């Protein structure tokens, strides 16, 4: 999976700004994206596999600087924006088999991705089904909330570079 843009910061300036000012704005935009990344990090600090983020300038003209905060983590994207419910259907006529591990626990599949498998060492009844409905993931809007919390800090980071 390629990079997914988490957030983009665009700074528009008046025409004819010199390169020194644009350099300062560029550094300020990257600093601002770093603040946003830190704010997102607070929201996902309990995740076992926290995604890596990258900050970069994606466009720079004489009157515009565009910075981009990206990640290649599909999981972050799913949790941030949510997913729609999906159906998983059995490919084999016998259906899918799962070992029920107890109330409040989870189901474990008998086979994993193309390989055979068995339930040795596991206890509980085997559940058979032809179809599974995967519920949707409700959007948590981590990026929007973090951006709202850090917007003043982002603008201040840019302002510091312009002084």
Image (cartoon, grey):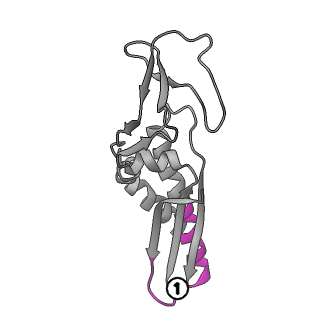
Please tell me whether residue 30 is drawn above or below residue 18 in the rendered image.
above
State the SS at label 1. Answer: loop
Coordinates of residue 76 in the picture (x, y in percent): 49, 46
Left or right position of 71 against 6: right
Against 12, is 97 above or below? above
Tell me the residue that label 1 is attached to: 17
Q: Residue furthest front?
A: 93
Quarter of the rendering containing residue 155: bottom left
At 44% from the left edge and 48% from the top edge, which residue is drawn? 78
Magenta stretch holds residue 23: yes
- Viewer-nearest residue: 89 or 11: 89
Q: Closest to the observer: 108 or 104?
A: 108
Tell me the magenta residue range.
12-31
Secondary structure that dominates the magenta span? helix
Image point (58%, 36%), residue name: 49
Q: Quadrant of the N terminus?
A: bottom right
**What residue is at 34 percent from the left and 53 percent from the top?**
148
Question: Going by the image, does 81 lie left or right of 90?
Answer: left
Residue 91, given in percent of the width and then of the height, sits at: 51, 42
Residue 159 is covered by the magenta coloring? no
């Amino acid at each position: 999976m390629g990079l997914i843009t988490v957030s983009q910061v665009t700074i528009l300036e008046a025409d004819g700004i010199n390169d020194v000012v644009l350099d300062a704005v560029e550094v300020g935009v990257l600093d601002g994206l770093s603040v946003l990344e830190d704010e997102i990090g607070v929201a996902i600090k309990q995740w076992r596999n926290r995604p890596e983020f990258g900050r970069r300038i994606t466009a720079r003209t004489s009157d515009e600087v565009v910075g981009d905060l990206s990640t290649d983590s599909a999981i972050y994207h799913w949790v941030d924006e949510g997913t729609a419910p999906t159906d998983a259907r059995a490919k084999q006529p016998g259906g899918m088999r799962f070992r029920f591990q107890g109330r409040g626990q989870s189901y474990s599949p008998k086979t994993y991705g193309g390989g055979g498998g068995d339930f040795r060492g596991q206890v509980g009844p085997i559940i058979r089904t032809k179809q599974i409905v995967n519920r949707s993931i409700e959007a948590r809007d981590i990026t929007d909330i973090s951006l709202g919390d850090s917007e003043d800090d982002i603008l201040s980071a840019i302002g510091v570079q312009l002084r």
